[in-house]
Image: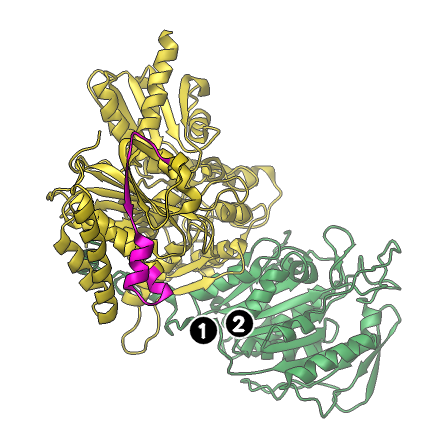
Chain colours: A green, B yellow
Amino acid sequence: MTSIQKPQVRHPGLPKNTLGYTKRDYEGAMSTLCAGCGHDSVTAALIQAFWELDLPPNRAAKMSGIGCSSKTTAYFMKQSHGFNSVHGRMPSVTSGASAANRGLTYIGISGDGDSLSIGMGQLCHAIRRNVRMLYVIENNGVYGLTKGQFSASADIGSTSKKGEANVQPPIDPALLALSLGATFVARSFSGDKTQLVPILKAGLMHDGFALIDVISPCVSFNDHEGSTKSYRFTREHEVEMTEVDFVPIRHEITTADSDAAVTAVQMHDGTVMRFRKTDEGYDPNDREKAYAHVRACQMAGEVATGLLFIQRGGADMHAVARTVERPLVELPYSELCPGKSALDTLMDSYR
Amino acid sequence: MSGINDFAFKMATVNGTGSASANSLLMQAIFRMGIPVAGKNIFPSNIQGLPTWYEVRVSAAGYMARPPEVDLIVALNTNTLAKDIKTVRSGGYVMYDSSWPIPEELRRADITFLGVPFGNMCAEAFERDRDRTLLRNIVYTGALGALLNIDHGVISQMLTEKFAKKKSLLDANAKAIQMGWDFATANFPCPLPFHLEAMDETKDKVIIDGNTACGLGAVYAGATVGAWYPITPSTSLMEAFKGFCEKYRVDKETGLRKFCILQAEDELAAAGITIGAGWAGARSFTNTSGPGISLMQEFLGLAYYTEIPGVFFDVQRTGPSTGMPTRTQQADLMMLAYASHGDTKHLIVFPANPHECFTLTVEAFDLAERFQTPVFVASDLDIGMNDWMVPRLQWDENYVADRGKVLNNEQLAALPKFSRYLDVDGDGVAARTLPGSDPKGAYFVRGSGHDKNAAYTEDSDAYKEVVDRIRRKIDGAATSVPAPVIIRNPGAEIGLITIGGCDAAVREAMDRLKEQGFHVDFMRIRGFPFDTPVRDFIAEHEVNFVIEQNRDGQLRSLLAIELGVPRDAMVAVLDYAGMPLTAKFVIDAVTAHFAGVTA
């Protein structure tokens, strides 16, 4: 992936978090994505979330596969180790890294091609394994780097830039995750930082696999009339379900505009975006209702956003494997090798 | 050739009927009599109902290769009876179930038929159908005991050990042994001309299979993360690792485990987990067979190019495609050497037997971390799943794991700048840092083009600088991979070059060829890339035979590619039908070559 180093400019007045870091300290290389790309907004929201959570950059690992979304791990937290692996295989690499060192915070960034086509098996099994990680799908319904082919999340009838209509049914990662037993399922919109940042923070603090599907329009190949992943379409069809400020994390999360029923915002292209308000009665602890709601929205041509489902206290990968609390990479060799006398005794049983 | 402590016998049964434990009992009893013994299990890719054979070779001289012929067969599978009777050498014996008549057309005049009414005897002696089936195997064990002069006390002792907690099973098994024993003694001239006499040649030996030894090696090497997807014939490797970890790596107070085994959704994910764990700093591995390595190609290229350690066990089976999953072969050599797209070359170690499975597994983990690259352990079904008599596995308490160049935070602090792919020491190996280290050591792993600082590049020179260094690094590893085993005989002008589990048969062939006037030198390759001694050995000999178990002469091709030796200047000896190699195959090939040359 391409990346350009940012000039080191210090802004003495920037606020610092408890670690003494400004938000700038959580940035990475300059983005080489198209101007206006939804992914850059997600990157900005991630930086905000890390900073607000006082996340030590060197205790986090950024994981990704291949695609526009996967490039973005270079654009935040330059002080963290990063692993840009192979297409669709980030979940297994992260599983292995987490198995070896459970002491780090794993941040996986993927896309709809990476997660729902070539890597769907890996995504499904990482969910089943319940690897403790934040897993963000930057979902634009299109293969951007290869110039605009439909992805598996493109809706039926959605047209490509060349006017061709998609005929295959879409895969909804939220429904997928819910059916596979994911313990944290959320959806947001790259253009809605107010909603996205708290969700990211909640996902980072979750005690298992946290899937966040972020509708993130592709300005070059999927932001036109006929696209169902455009800024305009998303703004008009978003149904926000829950506020996430109930999630027990270290900082208070505030969301703006929590009272108005419908908020209209004018976009740079002149379109009007419409937010539906949180349904007070929505229970994000009920998997069946969450599934039914997402499905109902889908049938109505709307996009359910917000924290859709959460279940805390589930057994994560390490709990299932019953590994020691201390990261395996920190165990001294003397605790791993049974030694000479054990082998001598063992050999007697092979006679 | 048969005689005292020098013969072979075979059991032909139906899989899923419990013959495996009886066959192991026989082999172990001979071993405990101090007599060198080898067993080969020839089994189907099936759970129940298909033919299976178990061959036992007794060799006072210690030859462990598959026997060329058998002196006696216990023919209990009616579906393979005709074929089984044909496999017995002239003058040999067939033991069969005389509860039913044997078809006249199958009888041979040159062999002796030993009829034992196993079916009737078991129906009479045991109540339950299950016992009648299972204990039939123990009855033939008893009959063989009398015919082959097995120490009765040894068998009794083994049954006592095995059924220490189940008195009823002990009694039933002891009864079955005695039934067979008494019948044979009463009806046949026991013992047969070829039989067993106690020796003292096994006291420093054990009987173990290669997969168990690899799993144990991984424990001793300090591996903590194992990822896998079930596949014959490698499955028992992870089962062994798990078993040993549960024995040695569970915290006594908390019950928590100092290891993490993940059964992945496929071999791609198993490779990804291995690489992820290797990147994070654990000693990690995956075990698979050829089809799994095919699926891992993409990840292997990533690990090669991003320089991440990991150990990949390939317990080879017969290919291509699904092939014959329960037959052996060495047909993955080319795939392992250059796995993945783009220019790659990988380190490989080639164990010949379970003893080397243990030692070379430990070496593989050292090599992987020292050279920051995937390392293959190329085993095969014969080594991995068969029980072999090998020297006891030993552990040197002075062993220090070679974790390679990993910078800690103090070392990082002393550096002006950390460059992940900069060759500081001139050996092609650049120091790495682990995730979680000081921000100064943070870098971005990428399979895309990168420069010495791990930054993305499309610049020709920056790209070449990295890939040229990796080539230097891998070529430099040739002196660190296990050296070939070379045996020289005075005046030899013929070289026998082989690899892996062919070792036993080729060594035996070397001895036999000497008796026929062919003086040969022996070289078994144990590591890739090849080092100078391999090249020198080839240059020293007028004729070199390359003996391997694949159709296309993959080792010979690798020698030609890597060393520049003309391929056709080496004589290919290729046994690729799925069975372990016999000395006879090698002898026939060598003598046929010279017969052709002189004719």
Seen from the viewer's position, the closer of residues A266 and B41 is: B41
Give me the disc on residue B135.
none
Q: Name the residue under label 1.
A: A320
Q: In which quarter of the image is the N terminus of chain B?
A: top left
Q: Tell me: residue B473, above or below residue A254.
A: above
- The residue under the point 50% across, 46% down is B293
Q: Tell me: residue A288, above or below residue B546.
A: below
Read off the magenta span.
B107-132
Seen from the viewer's position, the closer of residues B549 and B42 is: B42
Q: Earlier in the sequence, mark 2 or mark 1?
A: 2
Q: Tell me: residue A18, above or below residue A91.
A: below
Horizontal and vertical percent for residue A77? 56, 65
Q: Can residue A201 be seen from the camera position used here?
A: no
The answer to if B484 sits in the magenta stretch is no
As drawn, is A148 to the left or to the right of B159? Answer: right
Question: What is the spatial separation of the Cα atoms under label 2 and label 1, in whole angstroms?
Answer: 9 Å
Quarter location, residue B103:
top left
Q: Can residue B192 be seen from the camera position used here?
A: yes
Horizontal and vertical percent for residue B359? 28, 47
Seen from the viewer's position, the closer of residues B408 and B273 is: B273
For mark 1, does the 10 Å Cα neighbourhood hold few (<14), some (14 to 19), or many (20 or more) residues? Answer: few
Amino acid type assigned to the residue bearing label 2 in the image: Asn
- Chain name for mark 2: A
Q: Mark 2 points at which residue?
A: A130
Question: Contact, CB < 8 Å: mark 2 with mark 1?
Answer: yes
Q: Quadrant of the C terminus of chain B?
A: top left
The answer to if B111 sits in the magenta stretch is yes
As drawn, is B132 to the left or to the right of B167? Answer: right
Amino acid type assigned to the residue bearing label 1 in the image: Val
For mark 2, does the 10 Å Cα neighbourhood hold few (<14), some (14 to 19), or many (20 or more) residues? Answer: many
